[in-house]
Amino acid sequence: MMQSVRIVCKWASCLLLLYHTLCFGTSIVIVVSATGDYVVVATDSRNAALGKALPNDDACKVIALDDTLFLNSGTVVIGAIRGKLWDSLSEARKVYRMARTRDAERMSIDWGNRAMSWFYTQSRADIESITDPDGGLVTGGFINFDSQKRPVIFSQQVFFISSSRQLSRKPWVVEQGKIGVSGVGTDLVKEFEKAETVRARNAYGTLGLHKVTTDLAYDIQFAPKAVQFVIDNVEGKDKEFVHGPIDVVVLQRFVGVGWIRRKQNCYAMDVNPAKKKPTPKTR
């Protein structure tokens, strides 16, 4: 039922070759309703690296572009010694403003083109220092409703394949009635969804079981609980890359973007941030 991508920045080494580098290990959970009425997104807040500073929890991993959402994970801000700064969110805002239509797939591809163009100018050593073990560099995706009012979640994943010394990319799509996961803890989200272990059932608390993608009020609780389950149970090096607080946002057909909870600093990252966000309609 889940679709996922895992991006982890090897930040200890990337600081040797790059400066002002910000990396997200990330736990992003996306729930798309079975009827196509809404999409719920929950994200953690960990900045795994920011210059020479210690990790912090101010990351804005999902932003609003009017009635479109953009999410990102991986190495999302890079100030290279050779070349100009690259910023995933800035590129997303540029793509959105320049788009003739608000087609999520087309915007995702345009964003991917910009990412690929920037990475092409960097050295192999610099790129390798910020890839995950599978060669992952960065993921960026747009979420909105198409002309038929169907939810569209379309992302581009950019990779560097060391053996061939080539950049590549592939799409990542979350379909209607599915759960998508970006970042670490994919298996943990699956464990939480199935609720077959004691710790998973305990994590549900008073929330009922097995109603995901069928009820907005339920999914608004499910998505952040799934992210929290990752934060609480991820092990090893990955534990450095996920941490609260958890941001939660809903995109509803005919309603738009509604923030359930969000760090205040992230509103400035939006395109045309509204003074008051619409409250999601759960009935």
Image (cartoon, rainbow, N blue to C red):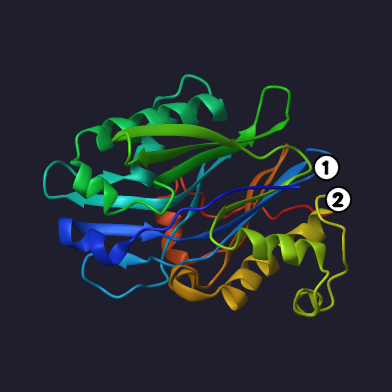
Which element type, helix, strand or loop, lies under badge 2?
Answer: loop
> Label 2, on which residue?
214
Are the residues flagged by discs 2 and 1 in contact, CB closer than 8 Å?
yes
Q: Which disc, if any, is residue 47?
A: none
Q: Position of residue 104 (x, y in %)?
A: 56, 30
- Residue kind at label 1, given as amino acid type: Ala
Using the image, determine if residue 153 lies above or below residue 219: above
Q: Position of residue 52 (x, y in %)?
A: 21, 70
Q: Is any atom of residue 184 visible in this view? A: yes
Q: Residue at x 87, y 58 (%)?
A: 211
CA–CA distance between discs 2 and 1?
6 Å
Q: Position of residue 271 (x, y in %)?
A: 44, 43
Q: Nearer the viewer, residue 140 or 220?
A: 140
Question: Dot 2: within a 10 Å radius of its alpha carbon, few (fewer than 14), some, or many (20 or more) residues?
Answer: some
Q: Earlier in the sequence, mark 2 or mark 1?
A: 1
Q: Residue at x 35, y 73 (%)?
A: 55
Question: Dot 1: within a 10 Å radius of its alpha carbon, few (fewer than 14), some, or many (20 or more) residues?
Answer: some
> Label 1, on which residue?
34
Which element type, helix, strand or loop, lies under badge 1?
Answer: loop
Q: Position of residue 152 (x, y in %)?
A: 65, 33
Q: Residue at x 26, y 57 (%)?
A: 21
- Residue kind at label 2, given as amino acid type: Thr
Q: Residue furthest left?
A: 82
Using the image, determine if residue 216 lies above or below residue 117: below
Residue 54 horizontal side relative to residue 232, left or right: left
Q: Is any atom of residue 221 visible in this view? A: no
